[in-house]
Each structure stands twice: as structure tokens, then as C-alpha cells.
Image (cartoon, grey):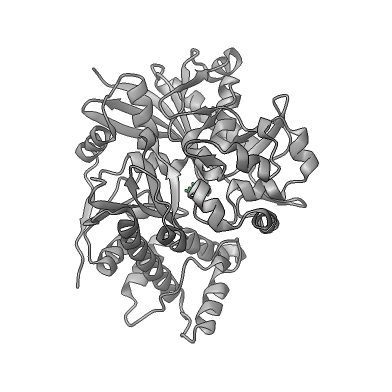
């Protein structure tokens, strides 16, 4: 076995990337060949993703990838979860809605009239999040759903455009709330009035979706290489590349969201898991990601965006340095309060939370940043402990991967607040997980997730933050 190259498309809520991966028994590297902004657009109907721009930028990036590395063996696509496009006869019926669009509230009310959350949880094992796909379907006009013949989650849509094959990748499909025991839950689908025919056949990570169509191959300057299904839910790919021993570690996949949990063999559907609002999402190789969505760096980036709306530029590293220098106590607020979900004036919402709880609101920007970091660290520590408790995992360390692993203050404060060592990195976990699953299908690496994680640990040594008392 020798090393080879694959390409990964990784779409995040704020930017997308195309990455060329090199992978082999002793090799794992990710090189970014394109990065492009993902800017949601607000129009009369609501907040949408500009999906055609994303596809255009991703294919331009792939073209560049094939120019620099003609031997790319395959392509894999991942993105955020839950959001979908409706199609008819292969034609897009509109830009997908953003999960932060407020129409989801309507869907929640409609679904819970028919089935309360506890009953849903017993079937699909999902945390209540107002934007889970099943609530979004319930917010659609019924005649539009009836007119569509196919619904594709974002990475499945990109895969469809690349190959002409419409499938639903299973890790991401698990975030729709419509899977039970790994298959579409026909009874629930019918009970919610969702046309069963719009849900495509499932495909699993490692399986081949199809080859590039001749037209796309031509556009990319490539041969008709295969598109491989990876953990197309970005968090599923990230968890593949956490260099952990799942029997003794928790992870935080930290970007826009902080996905905090453990990996287990089977879904945990206990009353405690329901009460703690934990989720059981489908993982690669049939594992279960028992985790909780914690609000994540969104609160910080949205705060900064608010301060920058008058045109001033904020230097994030300088802000975090200033935050580190704050002496004295800052408020630890509940980052999971739903008021922090939509875009808008975060500083005012944080101040309102403090007021309502009889606590002094941060005053300076540095204090706001410190308060956000402390609150995230506390939420990560709490969720890691709960995950261990629920999943029967003796959590002795916490791995932080993704963009948040670069935030040393956040990593250190998570260590301090949990009393556990934090292992930071790799920052590129999602892309690495995407690359590893493709590499295994292409015969460039072999073995279980443990073997893949061992390769990550050998090639991307994490940074250790010891807890300070
Ligand atoms: C992270 C993520 C989360 C999902 C959220 C919305 O990027 O995929 O796992 O809950 O985005 O899709």
C-alpha cells in the first residue's frame, strides 16, 4: 500500500473549502486548495443558503485541485446537517432554507401537535433542536412538498450534481429525525404527512455514490473518478478523525457549534438522555455519536460581527489576548439559551440574560469575549461529563478538534473547568475524516476507526492543556 490523493469538499456555515488529501499507511495530510465564503441571503421568504454559488465555488476549487494533483482518485463531500433542497425532475425548486431561519418554530408546533418530543426521541433518539429536518418539512407548504419528487440534504445535493445519482447518506440522514434503527421510519413519515417518495435510498460511508458525469468531468479537467459517500454530516467526519480512545474520552467538535459527546456502540434512549437533551446521531461504521449541540463559536463570531457592523474591523487574536488579561470574575451565562440561536445583537442578548439573572453584564469588549469563552468552557465541561455518564464512558480526557482547537484560552479554560486534560487538534478534523473514509475505500489505508485514529494521532500530535486548579 502506498499513499495516494483524494479531494474533499467541506462546506461549513461560514465558509467552504476544497482540500486535497494525501493518505497512506503512514501518511495523512490535508492541503487547502480553495476557500470561499458562505454568505446566507435574507429575502422575502426567509434566510436561505446561496447553494448555486457554493456549488460553483466548490467545482472551481475541484478544478484547481485536479490541476495541481491530476492523480486524485476520488471525491467526498461533507457539510453541516439538517438542511435540504426540494427537486422535481432533477430541477431545484428553490434555495434551501438556513436552519437559523425562524420559520422552523411553525414546524415545531405542527409536529408536536401530532407527536410530542418524548415520543419522537424514543423513535429517532434526537435532541430537540427546532431546526431538525422533520420540523422544517412541517413548515413547508403542503402543496410544495407534494409537487417535489426528491429531497436532498446539502452534501447529497452536491453529490447529485456531480454524479447524477440521488441518495441519502446515512450519517446526515440521521439528523432529519426520520430514521429509526438505521432506516427511514415509514410510520413516522406517514404520521407527519411527508410524502415518502421524496426520501431517497440510503447510502453508507465508504460506498461509492457514482462516477462524475461526463459533463462534470470535462468541466473539472478530470477523468470520471468516483464520488465516495463519506460521513457527509461534517460532525460525523470530524469524529472519525478525533485521535481518541472512545472508551475513555469525550470530544468537542468545535466550530460554529460545539458538538460535545462520546462515541458509543448503540443509541442511548434512556429517560436521562431525554432529560439531558442529548442526541444519538449516526456515526461512521455504524457507531453512535451520543452528543449535545452546545452553541459554539457562533456566539463569539456573531458578537464580533455585531460590533463590526459600522465598518470597524476587530482583530480577533488581539481581542482574545485582551480577554485573557481580564482579571476578576466574569459572568458565566447559559450559552444554550435559545435566544442565542438566531443572528442579531448578541451583546444585547447576553446583557439581557445577565439582567434577568441578577448578574452584572460584561462592560468592555474584552469582558464580553472572556465571558463568552468562560461560558463555552463551562458548557463543554458539563456536557462532556453528562455524555460520559449517559454513555457509560469513564471520561479521562477531552479532545477538542476543529477551529476551536486553535483557541488556546478556550482549550485551557475547558481543562480548568472540567479538571481533565484537554487534547487540542487536529484543526482539520472534518476534512481528515472525509479523506480517511475515501482513502479506505480506495485501498490507500485499511482497518477500523481505531486504526484510522491511530494514523491521525501519529501524524497530527495534539497539544496538551493540563488542568490548573
Ligand atoms: C455542525 C453541524 C451540527 C449540526 C448543525 C446544523 O457544523 O453540522 O452537527 O447540528 O451544524 O446543521
Residue 358 or residue 107, whichever sits in front: 107
Residue at 36%, 22% (x, y): give it: 441
Image position, residue 39 (x, y; %): 60, 47
Left or right for 84, reference 437: right
Q: Is residue 407 visible?
A: no
Residue 126 or residue 30, whichever sits in front: 126
Image position, residue 254 (x, y; %): 39, 53
Q: Is residue 57 above or below residue 272?
A: above
Q: Is residue 402 above or below residue 343?
A: above
Outermost residue, right side: 143
Count of numbered labels shown in the rendering: 0
Image position, residue 437 (x, y; %): 36, 29
Q: Is residue 412 visible?
A: yes
Residue at 61%, 15% (x, y): give it: 215
The quadrant in which the C terminus is found is bottom left
The image quadrant of residue 6 is: top left
Image position, residue 426 (x, y; %): 30, 45
Residue at 60%, 43% (x, y): give it: 83
Residue 143 or residue 350, whichever sits in front: 143
Residue at 59%, 52% (x, y): give it: 131
Left or right for 130, reference 225: right
Left or right for 384, reference 19: left
The quadrant in which the N terminus is found is top left
Amino acid at each position: 500500500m502506498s499513499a495516494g490523493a483524494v479531494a474533499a469538499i467541506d462546506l461549513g456555515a461560514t465558509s467552504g473549502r476544497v482540500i486535497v488529501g494525501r493518505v497512506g499507511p503512514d501518511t495523512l495530510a490535508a492541503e487547502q486548495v480553495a476557500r470561499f465564503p458562505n454568505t446566507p441571503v435574507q429575502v422575502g421568504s426567509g434566510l436561505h443558503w446561496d447553494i448555486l454559488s457554493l456549488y460553483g465555488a466548490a467545482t472551481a476549487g475541484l478544478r484547481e485541485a485536479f490541476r495541481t494533483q491530476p492523480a486524485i482518485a476520488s471525491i467526498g463531500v461533507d457539510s453541516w446537517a439538517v438542511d435540504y433542497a426540494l427537486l422535481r425532475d432533477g430541477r431545484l425548486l428553490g434555495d434551501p432554507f438556513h436552519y437559523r431561519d425562524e420559520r422552523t418554530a411553525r414546524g415545531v408546533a405542527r409536529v408536536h401537535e401530532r407527536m410530542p418530543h418524548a415520543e419522537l426521541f424514543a423513535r429517532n433518539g434526537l435532541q430537540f433542536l427546532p431546526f431538525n429536518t422533520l420540523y422544517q418539512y412541517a413548515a413547508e407548504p403542503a402543496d410544495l412538498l407534494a409537487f417535489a419528487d426528491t429531497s436532498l440534504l446539502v452534501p447529497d445535493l452536491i453529490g447529485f450534481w456531480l454524479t447524477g445519482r440521488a441518495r441519502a447518506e446515512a450519517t446526515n440522514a440521521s439528523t432529519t429525525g426520520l430514521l429509526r434503527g438505521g432506516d427511514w421510519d415509514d410510520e413516522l413519515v406517514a404520521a407527519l404527512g411527508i410524502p415518502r417518495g421524496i426520501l431517497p435510498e440510503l447510502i453508507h460511508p465508504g460506498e461509492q455514490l457514482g462516477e462524475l458525469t461526463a459533463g462534470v468531468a470535462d468541466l473539472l479537467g478530470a477523468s470520471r473518478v468516483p464520488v465516495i459517500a463519506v460521513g457527509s454530516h461534517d460532525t460525523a467526519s470530524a469524529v472519525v478523525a478525533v485521535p481518541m480512545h472512545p472508551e475513555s474520552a469525550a470530544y468537542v467538535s468545535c466550530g460554529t457549534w460545539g458538538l460535545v459527546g462520546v462515541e458509543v456502540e448503540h443509541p442511548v434512549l434512556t429517560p436521562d438522555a431525554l432529560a439531558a437533551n442529548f442526541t444519538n446521531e449516526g456515526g461512521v461504521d455504524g457507531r453512535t455519536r451520543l452528543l449535545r449541540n452546545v452553541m459554539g463559536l457562533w456566539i463569539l463570531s456573531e458578537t464580533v460581527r455585531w460590533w463590526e457592523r459600522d465598518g470597524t474591523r476587530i482583530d480577533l487574536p488581539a481581542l482574545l489576548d485582551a480577554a485573557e488579561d481580564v482579571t476578576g470574575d466574569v459572568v458565566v451565562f447559559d450559552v444554550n439559551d435559545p435566544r442565542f440561536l438566531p443572528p442579531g445583537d448578541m451583546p444585547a442578548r447576553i446583557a439581557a440574560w445577565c439582567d434577568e439573572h441578577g448578574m452584572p453584564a460584561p462592560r468592555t469588549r474584552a469582558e464580553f469575549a472572556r465571558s463568552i469563552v468562560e461560558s463555552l468552557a463551562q458548557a463543554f465541561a458539563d456536557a462532556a461529563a453528562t455524555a460520559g455518564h449517559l454513555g457509560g464512558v469513564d471520561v479521562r480526557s477531552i479532545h477538542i478538534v476543529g477551529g476551536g482547537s486553535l483557541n488556546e484560552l478556550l482549550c485551557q479554560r475547558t481543562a480548568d473547568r472540567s479538571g481533565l486534560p484537554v487534547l487540542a487538534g487536529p484543526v482539520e478534523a472534518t476534512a481528515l475524516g472525509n479523506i480517511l473514509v475515501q482513502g479506505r475505500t480506495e485501498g490507500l489505508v485499511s482497518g477500523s476507526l481505531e486504526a484510522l485514529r491511530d494514523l491521525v494521532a501519529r501524524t497530527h500530535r495534539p497539544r496538551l492543556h493540563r488542568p490548573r486548579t
